[in-house]
Amino acid sequence: MSAALTQRPARASWALGGLAAGVLPVMTVLMAIIAIWYGASVMMNRAWTLDQMQRQNIEMTPFEIIAAAMTQERPVLPPPHQVAAEIWNTTVGEPIMRERRGQMQGNPRNLIFHAYHTLWPTILGFGIGGFLGILLAVGIVHSRAMDMSVMPWAIASQTIPILAIAPIIVVVVSNLPVLNAAVDQGWISDDTKLLVPKALISSYLSFFPVVVGMVAGLRSPQTSDLDLMRTYSASPAQTFWKLRLPASVPFLFTSLKVSIAAALVGTIVAELPTGARFGLGARLLTGSYYGQTIQIWSALFMAAICAAALVMILGALERVVLKRMGARP
Amino acid sequence: MVQPTTAIAPDATGPVIAAKNLDLTFQTNDGPVHALRDVNLTINKGEFVSFIGPSGCGKTTFLRVIAALEHPTGGTITVNGMTPDEARMRRAYGYVFQAAGLYPWRSIEKNIKLPLEIMGFDRAEQDRRVRDVLALVDLEGFGKKFPWQLSGGMQQRASIARALAFDADILLMDEPFGALDEIVRDHLNEQLLTLWARTEKTIGFVTHSIPEAVYLSTKIVVMSPRPGRITDIIDSDLPRERPLDIRDTPEFLAIAHRVREGLRAGHAYED
């Protein structure tokens, strides 16, 4: 009892030390990035302020110039606080739903509304891509013919610029009779129909990391592990379920994390050339039409936050699964 | 689903393993490698046979041929009177590899259940057998642990338990204690002898160590490389009851001497 009591402060101070050791470097790097960002922002926005100064023929102190460079409406590079304010105003400061023509609808001024329109196709596309990736990897590992024929196509598919084929996919998919029939029958709404091509483009980018990771994972068992299965006269199916699949799980999670980030990029890119009205990609596009740099940056940050959140969710899932599979803590 | 087959009792009259003029040549990019040449050997039920020799003498290859993990290019071999492939299908042997080779995502218990699941034993039978073999290798209470939580010696014992779980008559062991330190190794050798006495299995045991081979075996097969072949077969007349200090007796040293001579005779010193 007394031993436990005397040990407590020691542990606490150790924990505090650990916290400081972890947080301090991270904060330092973050501060450095923000400082560089402010510096670059002033440097790049100064020209416009100086130009205005000359046109209006007024004198300004250097301090006033700096202040003015950081508060422009359409800065070349918006400083951090302007982006932060914009994100705050378009998430907390705007209602997510609004009334229009007597109906409650999503509010396109709200960034969360746009994030929602990007996240759903991302998750759907990630699901399709991940499933397809696993399926292809299983085929590639078990069939030499598939190994020789599918892998080159999978690699080739990733060399095609997604921006170039996104419009093609959108046009083709939007005109699929099945899809139109489904809308006519009232099975899916028009909004849901718009989601399909985005999800497909997203899956196009997200299947590849899963194929590569899973092929490596399914092939990771050593010769002696496979020999053991042979001494039991195990069938290929038994070898798959009891050896190859469990061995591939760490590889799977690593590739899923890469894949879900790629899926998000895929969805945003799919929104760009197709005149999408909602979604982070659409937000980026309107921002660039009207020179709203602050809006562009806040949309970019929202995309980064979404990607980080998705990867963190997968990371948490990975920890839980691997812990159950006996991984060392 | 394959039905569980109780291991076939070897033909009471015939040998458990019989190799005649066995040849095995690997085709490599550097030309053919003669892993085994003209190997003749008979192993009877209940024998403890050690294979000893320098690297490349084919001792592991011979064990793998018995297990049908390699296939000979000449000669014949029977296991329980069948081809090695047939014998394997009938669960004739348990194989212990040099590395424990426990699957890290399975607990010790689940690792031992692996062959039982594959062979289609029912749940209750699986649990019963896991309990039995854990007791046999002195690992009671460790069933729920994962492999990394056990020492190297304990892992190797778990691996032996896994090979024993489906109660095959033959136990093939490929340098199972090679990676362990000498004290642990001595201890496991003692335990292995006790286990052999209790289970009356036929054991094929590959080793690098002369004392280990002499201490454990009723028959010692001395092999030499290029081409892999048998140079001497020594039948040990040591009693079956063997305390560790038997290794200081003149009888023990005499056999060890003969093994050493056999190894020296077969060894080419040009390299």
Image (cartoon, coloured by chain):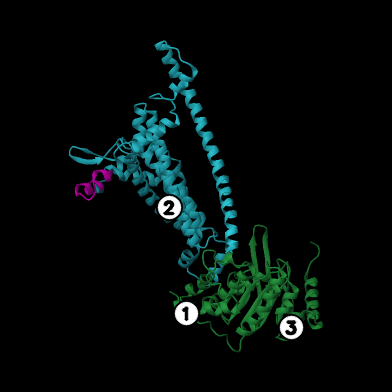
Chain colours: A cyan, B green
What distance separates the C-alpha of mark 2 from that of mark 3? 59 Å
Callout 2–callout 1 Cβ contact below 8 Å: no
- On the image, the x and y values in percent for residue A189 come to 23, 46
Quadrant occupied by the C terminus of chain B: bottom right
- Of callouts 3 and 1, which one flags the residue occurring earlier in the amino acid sequence? 1
- The residue beneath circle 3 is B236
* Residues in magenta, as a range: A179-193
Q: Quadrant of residue B15?
A: bottom right
Callout 2–callout 3 Cβ contact below 8 Å: no
What distance separates the C-alpha of mark 3 from that of mark 1? 38 Å
Q: Secondary structure at mark 2?
A: helix
- On the image, the x and y values in percent for residue B20 come to 65, 78
Q: Is residue B214 left or right of residue A155?
A: right
Quadrant occupied by the N terminus of chain B: bottom left
Q: Is residue A258 visible?
A: yes
- The residue beneath circle 1 is B125
The crowding category of the residue bearing disc 2, from other C-alpha atoms within 10 Å (few below 14, some 14 to 19, many at least 20), is many
